[in-house]
Amino acid sequence: MDFQYAPAPESRSIVDIRSSYGLFINGEFVGGKGEPFKSINPASEELLADIACADAADIDDAVRAARHAFDTVWGPMPGRERAKYLFRIARIIQERARELAVLESLDNGKPIRESRDVDVPLVAAHFFYYAGWADKLPYAGFGPDPKPLGVAGQVIPWNFPLLMLAWKIAPALAAGNTVVLKPAETTPLSALLFAEICQQAELPPGVVNIVTGAGETGRLLVEHAGVDKVAFTGSTEVGRAIARSVAGTRKRLTLELGGKAANIVFDDAPIDQAVEGVVNGIFFNQGHVCCAGSRLLLQESVAEEFLASLKRRMARLRVGDPLDKNTDVGAINSAAQLARVRELSQVGEEEGAERWSAPCELPERGFWFAPTIFTGVTQAHRIAREEIFGPVLSVLTFRTPAEAVEKANNTPYGLSAGVWTEKGSRILEIADQLRAGVVWANTFNKFDPASPFGGYKESGYGREGGRHGLEAYLEH
Amino acid sequence: MTLTAEVARSQGALRTFLHGLPGVDQVGAEQRAAMLGTRSIKTTAKAQALDLAIRMVDLTTLEGSDTPGKVRALCAKAVRPDPADATCPSAAAICVYPAMIPVAAEALRGTGVHLASVATAFPSGQAPLDVKLADTRAAVAAGADEIDMVISRGAFLAGRYAEVHDEIAAVKEACGDAHLKVILETGELATLDNVRRASWLAMLAGADFIKTSTGKVQPAATLPVTLVMLEAVRDFREQTGRIIGVKPAGGIRTAKDAIKYLVLVNETAGPDWLDPDRFRFGASTLLNDLLMQRTKMATGRYSGPDYFTLD
Amino acid sequence: MSTETPARLAVRKTYKLFIGGAFPRSESGRSYQVHSPSGEFLANAALASRKDVRDAVKAARAATGKWSGATAYNRGQILYRVAEMLEGRRDQFVAEVKAAEGLSRKDAAVLVDAAIDRWVWYAGWSDKIAQIHGGANPVAGPYFNLSSPESTGVVGIVAPADSSLLGLVSVVAPAIVGGNTVVVIASEGRPLPAASLAEVLATSDLPGGVVNLLTGKVAEMGPWLAAHMDVNAIDLTGVTDPTLGGELEVAAAENLKRVIRPSSPDWAADPGVSRMLSLLEIKTVWHPKGV
C-alpha cells in the first residue's frame, strides 16, 4: 500500500511577527542608524520582517550600556541572584517553547521537528545548567574567587540561531559578564524574541544587548575597544580575521569554527544504527552543522552493502515545508548558501566523483537542495577537504584502522568525528587517536549543556558547555 | 546451496551465521523508533491508516476462561467490527486456543477472516517436541489456517540454535498448508541482538511470520523490538527474495499506537509490508479504539465505549 | 728551564642548538656573542636561522606521536629525571645563571633550586591534570560522556628574556608535561643556561624532538615560528616588544594557533595550572549505554 502522510503543518499563528524590529539596547528596542535589511523565510522567500542595522554609533551605545550594567548591576550582584534571573529565563523559554520553535523554523528553514525537539529544549536546558553555576563559581576549578571579564562581544551564526545564542549568553551571564550579541543577518528573529524574554524576566537593562546587522556590524562589535571578551561561532575564514583583529589587545577570544568531520564505519558496526547515524550526521539541519559528519569513511569490506542501505534510507527522507511535523530535511538557509552548496557539488562532479541524490520533489519557491552523496571521493577532492555546510556527503573508503585514522585526521579542521564499531577496545583506541574535540562513538550529533564542545586545530579554540565552558568567561 | 540450507547445516554453521549478524545498538534503535513515533498522521492519511490497521488485527482471546460463547462473540466482532457501518472492514483473523478452534471455524466459515490458533505448548513452549507437533497437527486438522507457535527460549538463550531451528522446521512441516507464525517472546530474549538473531533463526527455519510475544510476558510488543524485526525481514528479503510477515502482539491498545507501528513498517520494511498478509497486530482491546477513532474521523465527534461492542 | 707543569688549559664549551635530540650548530654557520649584564664576554652562542626553526618544528612534529602516546606516568618519570639530572649539575647552573643574570652566587642558587623544584612540581602533574581538568559529564540521556585533556601538538615558545633558567623551565615544563612537543627560542640575551639545560634534557630519557631549543634573535625567528602552519600553539611570554608581540599574534592567526600573550609573571610565585591548560585540548567522547 502507498501510505502518503497528509500535510501536518504546525500552526504559525502562535507566533506574532512584527513588521519591523529595532536593536535591543539597554533594555529597550531602539532604531538602528544603519540601513535596515530584510529577513525572509528561506522556505518560501516570503518577507518576515524589516530589521534594524547597527552602525558604529549603535555599537558604541550597546557596549556602553553593557559596561554600565556590568559596573553597576550585574558585576556586583551576588551569584545567587544572577542565578535566579537565568532560571527565570529558562522557565520562560520552556513556557514559550512552541512559539520559539515556530519562529526559528520560519526564519531559518529548519524542520519544526528539530526546532521543537532539539533546538529549543537544548536552549532551555543550557540556561538551566548555567543558572546553577552562577553561585558556585569558586567550585568550578578556576581559583577560589574567579572574576568575570566584563563586556562580552558575541557573534553567532545562522544554523542554530537560538541555540548558539544560549551557548554564548548563558555562561557569560552566569559568570557575571554582560553581553552584546549579534545574531546572523539571515536569522535575527529568535534573538529578538529572546530580547523580549529578557524584558519579561525583568533582567536589568544593559545586561543583554542584541544588535542586528551583517558582517560589518559584527566587525564593529569585535573590534570595539570597550569589549573585554570576544566569542565567535562561524566560518574559519571569519574566525581567522577576528583572531587577527584582537591580536595585540587584551581581549580574550574563543572561536568555534568550521569542520569536516569523518564518520568512520567499521565492518563490525551496528549497521542499521550506523546508517541512521550517518544520515543524522549529515542531513540533520540540512547539513548546516559545523560538526556535521560530512566525510563518510567506509571500511571497504562493508562499503557496498552500507551504501545500498544508506541510499535506501535517504530515499525515505522527507524534504519540504519546515513547518510540516513530518519533514526531515528543510530549506537551505539562504540563496547565498544554496549557491555555495551547488557550486561545490558541481566541483565534486567535475572532479570525477559520482553523485547520487535522494529522489524527492523540491518545492518551487525557496532554497532547496536534495540530500546528496558523492562516492568515489578521495582525499584530494575539494569536496573531501572543504566545508560544504549543506546536505552533501562525501564517501571515502579505507582498509585498516590506521588508514581510517590517518584519513580522518588529514584535515586542517578538528571539531568532531564519529566511529562505528561494536568492538569496545577499538572505540577507545580510535577515539584516542582522532584529533577532534568531540568524538561520537556509535552515535552522532548529540549535544548537552553539561558536555563541553569545541575544536582542535583550525576548528577554533575554547570550549562551550559544561564546566569547561565557564573558563572562557572568567578571569583566572 | 541456498542460504537457508547452508546455514542450517549444523549447530556450528548456525551459530557462526547468527553471531555474524550486525549488532544492534539499543539506544540508536530506540531513538529511531521514538523518532518515527513522532510522525503526525492526520486527515486522509489517518483514515487510510485506521482501516488498514483494522484489517491487520488478529483479534485474540487466550484465556483459561474462554468459552464457546465468548469465542463466537469475538468471531462476530472480527467479521463485522462496526455493525453500524457497512464500510468498516473485517479484522484479519481470530486467534484462539486449540480447544476453541471448532467453534471459531464454524463461526468464521465463508467470511474470509482467518483462523489462527496458538500451538506448541503455548505460552511457555516447555513440552516435548512430539507433544508440540501433535498440538500443531490437531490445530490444523480442526480447521486453523494459521498457527502461532512459540520458540524454546530456554534452548535459544542456551545457544542451542540447531534445536530451536529444527523444532520450528518440524512444526512448519506439521502445519502443512497453514501459515506459521513464530513467536519469539522478545520479552524473554532481553536484548535486541537476540531479537535479531531469533528473527533470522525463525526465518531460516521456515517461518511465514515472526511475532513478538505471547502476550503473557512483559514487556510484550514494543516499537524498538518491532523495528529490529522489520529490519530483519527487510534484509532477509534482500538475501533470499522471500517476504516474511511481522506481528507485534500484546500491549498495543490505542489507534495512536497502531499508527506508530504502521509508520514504522512504512519507513523500515517499506510499503510492501503494509498488507494484512505481511503485517498483523495481535490485540484485543485495540480494535475498539480503532473503531472509535474511525467514527471520530467520520462524524467529527469523539465517540465513547458505549457505542461499540465489548467483545 | 723550569720543569714546572704549565697551568692546565681549560676546555671551553661550545654552546649549540638542540634539535631532534642532537646538538647541531646553526645551519647558517652563524653565531653571536653573549655578554653578562655588566658587559663581560661570556661565550658565543649559535645564531639560529629560519631553516633551523623549520628543522626544529619538523623534529617536534615527529616526536608528537611517541611523546603524547606515552603514559602519563612515564612522562612524569622522565620529567622527574630531568630534575635529578639538574640537581647533579646544580653548581654548573648556579655559575651560569650567576653569570647570565649578573646575580650573586647565593641569589643564583635560589633560582636554580626553584627551577629544579619546578621540574619536580610539574613532573607530578603529568598524571593528575587529566583528573582535575577532565571527567564524566552527566548528560541528559543514556550516554557515557567523558571529557579528557589532550596535548595540542607542537608548541612554539618564546622563553622569558630575563629569567634565563627558572623562567625557561616555567614555560617548557608545563607545555611538555601534557604531551606537547616544543620549539623554544631561548632568552636572546641570556641563552647559555638554556643551552646547558638542553644537555640535561638529552640525558634524561626525554625522547629526541620533544624539546628543541634555539638560540638567537627573537625578532628573526619569531615570525617564522608564529607563522609556521605545522605549529599548533605559540607561547609569546618572552616577547618584550609589544609591536612584535602583536605581529606574531597576527601571524599565529593564520592557522588559528592557541596563543599565550606576552607577560612577565613573578616566576617565583605558584604557577597555577592555567599555563598547562592553555596548551591542552579537551576531547569529549560520547557512547550510548545499552545492552
Image: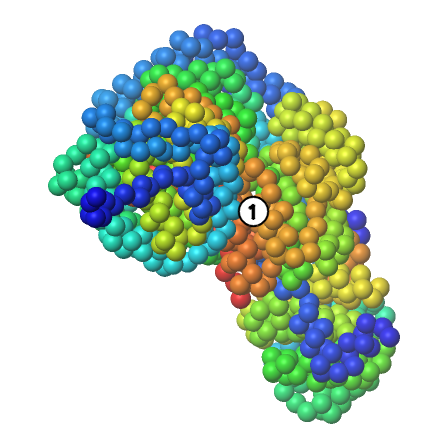
Residue at 45% over, 26% down: C223
- Depth check, front residue: B251 or B159: B159
x%, y% of residue C23?
Answer: 43, 44
Residue at 29% over, 39% down: C193
- Depth check, front residue: A167 or B43: A167
* Residue A87 visible somewhere in the drawing: no
Q: Which residue is mark 1?
A: A417
x%, y% of residue B164?
Answer: 70, 82
User: Is the residue marked by circle 1 packed among few (<14), some (14-19), or many (20+) residues within 10 Å?
Assistant: many
x%, y% of residue A342?
Answer: 72, 29
Q: Secondary structure at mark 1?
A: strand
In the rendered view, how is the structure colored?
Answer: rainbow
The answer to which quarter of the image holds residue A31 is top left
x%, y% of residue A291?
Answer: 55, 40
Amino acid type for the residue under numbered disc 1: Ala
Return the chain for callout 1.
A
Depicted A68 relative to depicted C157: above or below: above
- Depth check, front residue: C70 or A272: C70
